[in-house]
Amino acid sequence: MEDLSFLALLLLLPLALLFLILYFIVRPHPVNIPIKNRHVFITGGSSGIGLALAHQAATEGARVSILARSLDKLEEAKNYIRLSTGIDVSIFAADVRDYDAVSKAVEEAGPIDLLIVNQGVFVAEELEKQGLDEVKFMVEVNLIGSFNMIKAALPEMKKGEDRGPRSIALMSSQAGQVGIYGYTAYSASKFGLRGLGEALQQEVISHDIHVSLVFPPDTDTPGFAEENKRRPPLTGIIAESSGAMNAEDVAKRALDGIKSASFIVRCNFEGLLLSIATAGLSPQRSFVMAFFEVVAGGLVRLVALCFQWRWYTSIQKWQAQNKRT
Ligand SMILES: NC(=O)C1=CN([C@@H]2O[C@H](COP(=O)(O)OP(=O)(O)OC[C@H]3O[C@@H](n4cnc5c(N)ncnc54)[C@H](OP(=O)(O)O)[C@@H]3O)[C@@H](O)[C@H]2O)C=CC1
Ligand SMILES: CCCCCCCCCCCCCCCC(=O)[C@@H](N)CO
C-alpha cells in the first residue's frame, strides 16, 4: 500500500511540477477582450458564419459593422439582424481585394476594437483541373484580402490603447491545419493566414492587440451549399472525418475564443485534436492547453497517422474503382 502511494507520488510529482512551470511560462499572458459597447468590424458579414457572428455580437451589445461586396446581400443581412434583435448594424460595400475601397470603409466605420477578418471563397477541385484564375482568386480574396483589411485597420487600432485590449481575428479552416485533397489553393491560402497571424501577434502584443485564428470544420452556410455542388467526392470523404457544424455554433465558438484571446480557436472535438497535433510554435496563453500539448502530443501524432492511413486508403480505393468503371 505504501509502495503504491509512493509510486503514484513519483508519477504525479513531475506532472504537478510541469503544470506549475507551464503556469508561469505560457506567453502571451492571458487576457479577456470585452465586446459589450465596443466596435466589432466583420468582413464577409452578410452571409453564413460572418452573418451569424454579426448577429451574435449585436446581441451581446456590440456596435457592429459588416463589409462585403454585394450591397443587396448586406441590406438583406441588416434587415435580418434588425428584425430579430431590433439592433442596426452599419454596412459597407467593398471588395477586400481593393485596398482603397477597404481603407475608405474602415475610415467611415470609425476606430475598430475587434476586427474579424472572415471573408473567404472556396472552390474545391484537383489542382490539375483547376484554372490558375481560380487559384489566384482564392489566394487574393482569402490571403491578400486579409492583408488589405489589416493594413487598413491597424494604424487606428494601435492608437486605441485607452480603450482596452483589442483583437484581430482571422477565419481560417481545418483545411488550414491539414492539407486536404481538392484544396491545394484553399489550404495554401488558409495556411498562409497562420503565418500572418503568428508573426503579427509578436508585432502588436505591445499595443495590447491580440490575434486569434479560428479553425471551423465543414459548416452549413450558403457558401458551403454552393461549394458542395462541385466538390470532388474525395474531398467530401476526407472532410467528413470532422463533424459538420451550423453557422450559429461556429460563431459562438469563434466569439468565445476571440473574447478569451485564444490564439488557436477550435470549434469541435476533432478541432481539439487538430490543435494539439499542429501546436508547433504557436503562442499559447492557456497553461491547461499547454499541458495537454506537452503530455498528449505523441499520442495525438499517433491518432493523426491513423487518420492519414485511412485517408490514403480511401484515395487508393476510390481511384482504383474509378479506373475500372
Ligand atoms: N462553410 C464552411 O464549410 C467553412 C467556411 N470557412 C471559412 O469561413 C469564412 C466564411 O465562410 P462562409 O460563411 O461559409 O461563406 P459564405 O460564402 O456564406 O459568405 C462569404 C462572405 O464573404 C463575403 N465575400 C466574399 N468575397 C469577398 C470579397 N472579395 N470582398 C469582400 N467580401 C467578400 C461574401 O459577400 P459577397 O459575396 O457579397 O462579397 C459573404 O458575406 C470563409 O473564410 C471560409 O473560408 C472555414 C471552414 C469551413
Ligand atoms: C490529430 C487527428 C485529427 C483528426 C481530425 C482530422 C479531421 C480533418 C478534417 C478536415 C476538414 C476540412 C474541412 C474544410 C472546410 C472548409 O473550409 C470548406 N468547407 C470550405 O469552406
Image: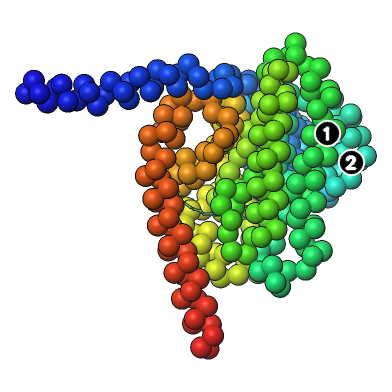
* Residue 307 visible to an observer of this rendering: yes
User: Does residue 53 sit above or below 209 in this rendering?
Assistant: below
Q: Residue at x 56, y 25 (%)?
A: 260
| Residue 64 placement (x, y as % from top left) | 74, 30
Q: Residue at x 44, y 69 (%)?
A: 313
Q: CA distance from mark 2 to mark 1?
A: 9 Å
Query: Under tag 1, what secondary structure?
Result: helix
Residue closest to the eye, 176 or 69? 176
Furthest residue toward left: 1
Left or right placement of residue 68 versus residue 273 in this view:
right
> For the residue marked with disc 1, what is the amino acid?
Lys
Numbered disc total = 2
- The disc label shown at residue 151, or none: 1
Q: Which residue is mark 2?
A: 99
| Residue 67 placement (x, y as % from top left) | 80, 40
> For the residue marked with disc 2, what is the amino acid?
Tyr
Q: Residue at x 40, y 17 (%)?
A: 20
